[in-house]
Amino acid sequence: MRNQAIYGIFVDNIEINPLDPSVILSLKQQNIIHAPVVKRGEFLGLVDLLSVEEPNQINLTEKDLIVPGTLTEKDPPYRYWEEIAKSRLSVIPVYSDELKYKGCIKTVDYVRHYKEQIGREESGSLLMCLIQGAQYSISTIAKVTEEHHLVIASLLRIALSEGNLLVIILFNEECSDVYINDLQRHGYDPIMIFNSETVQEPLKDRYDELMHYLNV
């Protein structure tokens, strides 16, 4: 039975070995690339569906799984953003207050919830940007944003290890690839962009384009 989380509907779990091809197909059709893998209801981790071509021929082990940190619905936003950024997650495991696995929500549902929580549900793109601490300059980000006729509706800074920063920027409208390119030229690393209909990973998109061009 699929339960309701405060952020949205839990996605289907996949029972480990053998994997159910119908569940994998359903998740892929929802643009979900990380599937929650369970064993008799116990959460084991997430499998990258891009690496699963023939489910019936794969025997998953723990080394094949991504195991995010434990998050409950009471955890603050910065904890969610840290986990999403760490592995570019398309789903997020959620636990009860007693740390029992409840299910996985889609990251896009959490983004929608975050916008509602800060009163910006009608805003545009949400950008996750990784920045070397010494390179961070709010004036530079503001200048580039203004040049592209965008307005920053909200900005959240999260301190990471080694002096790095994760910056969550919410815009009044959807931002373009040209804007993303400009940020990269200033030394910033946009890692995920949530638009109204799509989720982008700029560096992965460029890598895929290069491989396609090289016919690899």
Image: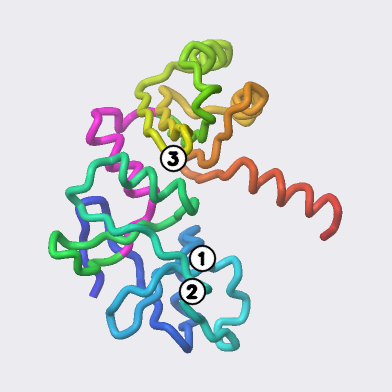
The residues bearing labels 3 and 1 have C-alpha atoms spaced at a distance of: 33 Å
In the image, residue 72 sits, relative to residue 111, either above or below, namely below
Residue 106 higher or lower than 180, as above or below: below
The stretch drawn in magenta includes residue 160: no
Question: Do residues under tags 3 and 2 come within 8 Å of each other at their CB atoms?
Answer: no
The residue identified by callout 1 is 28
Residue 114 on image: x %, y %: 29, 39
195 horizontally vs 157: left or right: right
> Circle 1: is it few (<14), some (14-19), or many (20+) Cα within 10 Å?
some
Q: Mark 1: which amino acid?
A: Lys
Q: Looking at the picture, how far across and down is residue 63, in whole percent?
A: 51, 74
- SS class of the residue under badge 3? helix
Could you tell me how far apart the alpha carbons at marks 3 and 2 are, in whole angstroms?
35 Å
- Magenta part of the protein: which range? 104-123
Give the mark toward the camera: 3 or 2: 3
In which quarter of the view is residue 122 placed?
top left
Q: Which residue is mark 3?
A: 161
